[in-house]
Amino acid sequence: MLDNKKLKEVENRVKQHISDGSIKSKERKEHVDFFLTNAQDSLQSAKLLLDVSTNEKLQEATGYLNFNGFLWVINASYYSMFYMVRALLDNSGIKLKSDLSVHGLAFDALVYYFYITGRLQKSLIELFIEAKDEAADLLGKETADELIANYFYEKRKRAKLTYEIGELAMQNKARTSVQRAEQFNREIKRIIESSIEN
C-alpha cells in the first residue's frame, strides 16, 4: 500500500512534473466524455473477453474454440480504470502531457490531487453518509485506500503480465481484475457526477 515514504515520493514527482509542464492546470474540461466512453468500452471489452474465455457455448457460437483471453481481460480492466482516472483528472482541470509513460503520471496525479489532499476520501465519505452507513468515516477511508491500492495493483499487474515472457494470466486473476475495475469505475464516476452537479 502507499506508506508515508511512497506518498512523499509521489508528491516530489508531481512537483517535478508540474515544474517541467507534464502536469498542468487548465480551465476547460476538454476530454471528460472521451475518457468516460473509453473507460466504459474497455470494461465492456474485458467482460466480453472473460465471457468468451469461460463459456464454451459462446466459443462455439463465435467460432473461437478454446479461446483464452485472460491476459487481455486484465489489460482491458486496467485500461478502464486508467481512462476513469483520466476522466477524473480532466474533470478537475488537470491536464497530463508526457512523452514517457502517461500511466505513471496519471497514477501520481491521482494520488497527489485526490488521495493526499483528501479530496477522494471526502467524496467517498459523502457517498457513504448518503447511504446511511453507520461507519461512514472509517469505511470511506478504507474505500479510498482500497481504490488507490486497486488502481496501483492493476497497473503493476498489467505491466507484469504484458511484458514478462512466459507468465500466464489465470482465470481468477482476470475475474478479479474485472471486479476491481467495476468497483473503481463506479466510485470515480460518482465523484465526477457529483462535481458536475455542484
Image (cartoon, rainbow, N blue to C red):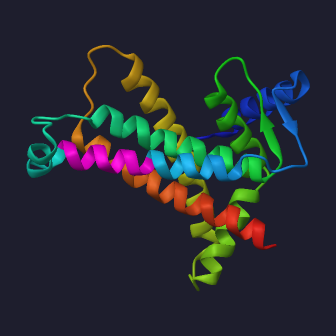
Residue at (66% x, 70% y) in the render: 125
Considering depth in this image, is 4 or 25 the residue closer to the camera?
25
Q: Quadrant of residue 64?
A: top left
Considering depth in this image, is 143 or 65 the residue closer to the camera?
65
Residue at (27% x, 36% y) in the render: 70
Residue at (70% x, 44% y) in the render: 110
Q: Is residue 193 left or right of residue 181?
A: right
Image location of residue 168, percent across then percent down: 25, 26
Q: Is residue 159 left or right of residue 93?
A: left
Q: Is 20 one of the magenta-colored residues?
A: no
Q: In this view, does 47 lie to the left or right of 102?
A: left
Image location of residue 176, percent across then percent down: 34, 48
**Magenta stretch bounds:** 43-53
Image location of residue 138, percent across then percent down: 60, 69
Q: Residue at the far bottom: name it.
A: 132
Q: Is residue 53 above or below residue 37?
A: above
Q: Is the magenta stretch mostly helix, strand or loop?
A: helix
Q: Quadrant of the image for the N terminus?
A: top right
Q: Is 52 one of the magenta-colored residues?
A: yes
Q: Is residue 7 left or right of residue 27?
A: left
Q: Can residue 81 be seen in this view?
A: yes
Residue at (82% x, 73% y) in the render: 198
Q: Residue at the far front: name it.
A: 62
Q: Is residue 21 above or below residue 25?
A: above
Considering depth in this image, is 11 or 48 the residue closer to the camera?
48
Please state the total of marks drawn on the protein image.
0
Q: Can residue 177 be seen in this view?
A: no
